[in-house]
Image (tube, rainbow, N blue to C red):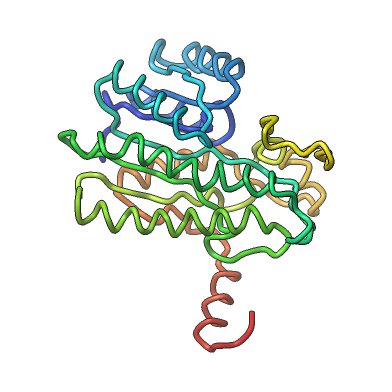
Amino acid sequence: MKDFNGKVAVVTGGASGVGRCLAQQLAAEGAKVVITDINADKLATVAAELNAEGPSGTIEGIASDVTKEESVQALADAVFAKYGRVDMLFNNAGVGLADMRSPFWDLPMKDWQWGFGVHVMGPVHGIKAFVPRMMEQQGEGFVVNTTSGNGALHSLPNTPIYASSKAALTSLTEVLYGQLKEKAPHIKVGILFPGPRLVNTGLLDSPRPDEYRDASNPLPKGVAMSDLAERMGGIEMTEPDDVAAYCLECVKKDQFWMLHPESGMDGFEARVASLRERRNP
């Protein structure tokens, strides 16, 4: 997809971070963009800000909960009713979880339900709601799912929910690519690895819906990624603007693996070597 002018894009997790930047950059290139997020008030504010900064009226906010199939179906119905088509779907919503350094067996089920609900079922709901109608359209389409090197390339043992949900999403995306290549080759698929370094977003302070809260296990306060980077010795960070720009560059190239060339591959290479040599990780 070489040109975004006049295209219609839907971005989940569009009220902040990489999603917000994707919307801003798509609109700057002439696309009409629908951003969605569970926080309706924040979504409306961000849509207004983006329209004030760029081409007026090109970005619309529609609240939805990606963990709920009926909510995403309603989103799709609203978008197709207004715009008549969707050319690009960015399943970008993500959450940070309080699973760091917690034993697998001690994590509450609501943590698992929330993490997998957003990272796995969110894209599933998006694919089911949008892709069949995109397949019927004339012209190119594109679906991008946002994963992580943690889970997709190798799994950090101190993040059991995050890593395993991103591993599942990566496999899901590879399957989607294979199926659309056979059944609807005009719909391309890509998987985005935000990076190449820790991305400066509010992921670890993601607001959690009440249904995924456990009264017996109060949630710790999240931290900003910038604070985490400082704790890690002041490591260099990647800005979400740069992630969005790289993603859209890959869309224009019909590139599946949206993995920045500067991304660290040591963990992945060690994993492959372990598998090839049949030795324990």
Q: Is residue 183 left or right of residue 102?
A: left
Q: Residue at 53% across / 89% down in the picture?
A: 277
Q: Is residue 148 left or right of residue 2?
A: right
Quadrant containing the C terminus in the rendered view = bottom right
Q: Is residue 127 left or right of residue 98?
A: left
Position of residue 77 measured from the top left corner of the image (x, y, whole percent)? 34, 23
Q: Is residue 173 above or below residue 78?
A: below
Considering every residue shown, the one lying at the far left of the view is: 138
Residue 197 appears anywhere in the view:
yes
Position of residue 188 measured from the top left corner of the image (x, y, whole percent)? 28, 47
Q: Residue at 66% across / 30% down in the picture?
A: 209
Residue 20 appears anywhere in the view:
no
- Quarter residue 266 falls in: bottom right
Q: Residue at 26% across / 26% down in the picture?
A: 85
Taking depth in this image into account, of 133 and 71 the one nearest to the observer is 71
Q: Is residue 124 above or below residue 69?
A: below
- Quarter residue 219 falls in: top right
Q: Residue at 44% across / 29% down in the picture?
A: 70
Position of residue 231 measured from the top left corner of the image (x, y, whole percent)? 82, 50
Q: Is residue 170 left or right of residue 218?
A: left
- Quarter residue 239 falls in: top right
